[in-house]
């Protein structure tokens, strides 16, 4: 995706995806760290973290990433919200990178709902 | 191979091996400093020679052991150049001669390739084994010399304390700690070379990638690619976000190693007794990496970005780990894992990865100690610096008394500012814990090997962990004679 050509709405939506996935990662890591050593939750938490990294790379420089921390106490809910944002975005800013991110987040929602998150 | 500058490629490689063996026989500990300083050049020339040799039929570039060894060599180089022990100074002459031999061999081979000499490729497959063997012996000799140097320091400390010598005449705690850290690094380099050499002998990588071999190779390639990207990122002005990612992935690798080793033990493919010692050590390593990740995470800001190549490498590794050892409900059962991957081969791959993690732990500690670009939000710095300063003051450190680390304006704006010394201490301590826990895991993993390999002296029989360099004996045999590496 050409970050420079991105309109403000798209950039802000992606920044919202970054906030949601980062908060989901914080919760996922907290759960993994609370569990005993060797928790399989690490695998899920790392996946969420990487999705947040992936989203961050799509946001153009200069876009305000900081914002209110999304309120939700489980990663699955935050990831579902991120996926919805990305679905809304995709027809407008159809790019391979956004499609990849949406697929990644959808996989993570599935993982969260099927218990892989430990 | 044709003659060039008086000697053939085979003669140059034989000579290199001989020089490494002679260095091993010369037990003077004083050479340790020059050996450490000379290692990066030796390793670089080996990597350049390796690069012009034909690749194996199925080995991916990322799975090439020399790439990881070269990255470890560059890490030692950066460490020495940055002023860490032993600092700049004369290099070991034997290491310089081996490096020169490798460079000459590379020139000869390049000429042969250009002239399309019919015998240009004769013996080149054994050339890689010879290079690895020379590196292995040279790394071992360096570890042994460092062990001797360490004992000398301990003796001087003891004598100094007994005779109440002035402190300036005694070795410093920093020097003792630095030598210990360097021993651990060369221990890891040596074991990695030994493992790679053994793998070439077993020739598993030349088998076609079918069935369980395919996910095994996928995991192997993903681990190797991850290690290379981790080294590269950490060498190139890393951000705290990169350190978080490295720490989290290293924690996952430690856990994956536990899962695979336990599965292998349940299936009687490795010694169950070893696992009893290894599992707690790996758990400690995982927890230490996780604590380190949390400390680094405090320094990130909303604008932080993780290096993109690192993110991709972590993604590939996560996918490979999931495919190998996870299912919908968490970790797969031993039987499921055994059905997916070649357990003994994966155990050895993860063991090699554990060795690389020692180096990453040490690099992390160096970054925490003196990377000039480290910065963090003022509020976090204020909190951490104050806490660490209070601990230091309680321990008798007077420099921090009455110092204000952050201005009210910086706190109000939560400005990103350079990390002051006390704030680094917590990171250094966390990284030191990681290095210690990883070393323990490596030591506990030293005797992990597939059961069918255990009775013989071992294709990698010299693999040992921790600081046991002084106990080592390596038989002097030719690399191609089929015994242990040396």
Image: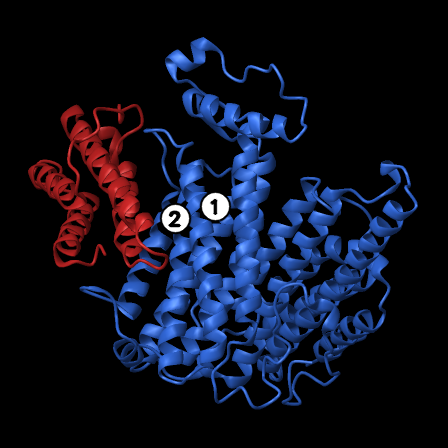
* Left/right of residue B262 with respect to residue B27 in the rendered view: left
> Dot 1 lies on which element?
helix
Q: How far from the left and from the top, in percent, is residue B52?
A: 57, 68
- CA separation in Å, label 2 and label 1: 8 Å
Q: Residue at x 85, y 57 (%)?
A: B30
Q: Residue at x 30, y 77 (%)?
A: B334
Q: Which chain is represented by red in the image?
A: A
Of residue B122 and residue B38, the one placed in the foreground of this image is: B38
Query: What residue is shown with label 2?
Result: B309
Q: How far from the left and from the top, in percent, is residue B418?
A: 52, 24
Q: Residues within 10 Å of mark 2 (few under 14, many from 20)?
A: some
Chain for numbered disc 2: B
* Left/right of residue B434 with respect to residue A82 in the rendered view: right
- Of the two numbered discs 2 and 1 on the same chain, state the one appearing first in sequence: 1
Query: What residue is shown with label 1?
Result: B233
Q: How far from the left and from the top, in percent, is residue B457?
A: 62, 87
* Left/right of residue B109 with respect to residue A3 in the rendered view: right
Contact between labelled residues 1 and 2, with CB atoms less than 8 Å apart: yes
Of residue B418 and residue B17, the one placed in the foreground of this image is: B418
Residue B471 versus residue B426 in the image, above or below:
below
């Amino acid at each position: 995706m050409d970050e420079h050509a991105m309109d403000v709405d798209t950039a802000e939506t992606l920044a919202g995806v970054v906030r949601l996935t980062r908060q989901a990662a914080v919760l996922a890591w907290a759960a993994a760290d609370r569990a005993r050593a060797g928790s399989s939750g690490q695998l899920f938490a790392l996946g969420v973290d990487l999705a947040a990294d992936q989203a961050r790379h799509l946001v153009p420089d200069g876009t305000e990433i900081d914002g209110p921390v999304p309120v939700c106490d489980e990663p699955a809910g935050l990831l579902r919200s991120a996926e919805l944002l990305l679905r809304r975005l995709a027809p407008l800013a159809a790019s391979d990178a956004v499609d990849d991110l949406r697929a990644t987040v959808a996989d993570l929602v599935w993982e969260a709902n099927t218990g892989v998150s430990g | 191979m044709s003659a060039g500058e008086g000697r053939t490629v085979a003669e140059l490689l034989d000579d290199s091996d001989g020089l490494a063996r002679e260095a091993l026989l010369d037990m003077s500990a004083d050479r340790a400093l020059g050996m450490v300083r000379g290692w990066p050049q030796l390793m670089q020339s080996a990597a350049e020679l390796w690069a012009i040799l034909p690749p194996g039929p199925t080995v991916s570039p990322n799975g090439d052991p020399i790439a990881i060894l070269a990255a470890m060599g560059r890490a030692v180089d950066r460490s020495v150049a940055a002023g860490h022990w032993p600092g700049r100074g004369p290099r070991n002459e034997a290491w310089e001669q081996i490096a020169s031999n490798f460079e000459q061999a590379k020139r000869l081979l390049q000429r042969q390739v250009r002239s399309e000499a019919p015998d240009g490729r004769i013996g080149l497959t054994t050339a890689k084994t010879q290079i690895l063997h020379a590196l292995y012996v040279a790394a071992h000799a360096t570890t042994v010399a460092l062990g001797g140097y360490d004992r000398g320091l301990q003796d001087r400390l003891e004598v100094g304390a007994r005779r109440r010598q002035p402190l300036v005449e005694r070795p410093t705690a920093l020097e003792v700690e630095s030598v210990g850290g360097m021993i651990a690094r060369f221990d890891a380099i040596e074991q990695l070379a030994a493992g790679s050499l053994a793998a070439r002998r077993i020739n598993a990588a030349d088998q076609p990638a079918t069935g369980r071999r395919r996910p095994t190779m996928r995991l192997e390639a993903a681990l190797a690619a991850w290690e290379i990207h981790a080294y590269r990122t950490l060498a190139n002005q890393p951000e705290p976000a990169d350190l978080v990612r490295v720490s989290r992935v290293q924690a996952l690798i430690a856990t994956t190693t536990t899962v695979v080793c336990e599965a292998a033990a349940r299936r009687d493919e490795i010694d169950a007794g070893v696992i009893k010692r290894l599992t707690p050590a790996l758990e400690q390593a995982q927890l230490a990496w996780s604590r380190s990740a949390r400390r680094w995470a405090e320094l990130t800001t909303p604008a932080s970005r993780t290096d993109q190549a690192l993110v991709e490498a972590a993604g590939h590794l996560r996918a490979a780990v999931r495919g190998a050892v996870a299912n919908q409900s968490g970790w797969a059962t031993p039987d499921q894992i055994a059905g997916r991957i070649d357990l003994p081969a994966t155990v050895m791959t993860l063991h090699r990865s554990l060795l690389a993690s020692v180096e990453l732990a040490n690099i992390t500690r160096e970054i925490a100690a003196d990377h000039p670009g480290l910065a963090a939000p003022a509020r976090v710095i204020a909190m951490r610096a104050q806490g660490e300063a209070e601990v230091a003051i309680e321990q008798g450190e007077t420099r921090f008394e009455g110092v204000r680390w952050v201005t009210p304006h910086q706190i109000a704006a939560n400005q990103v500012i350079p990390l002051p010394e006390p704030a680094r201490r917590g990171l250094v301590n966390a990284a030191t814990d990681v290095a210690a826990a990883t070393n323990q895991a490596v030591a506990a993993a030293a005797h992990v090997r597939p059961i069918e390999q255990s009775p013989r002296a071992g294709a990698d029989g010299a693999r040992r962990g921790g600081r046991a360099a002084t106990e080592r004996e390596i038989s002097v045999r030719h690399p191609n004679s089929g015994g242990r590496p040396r």
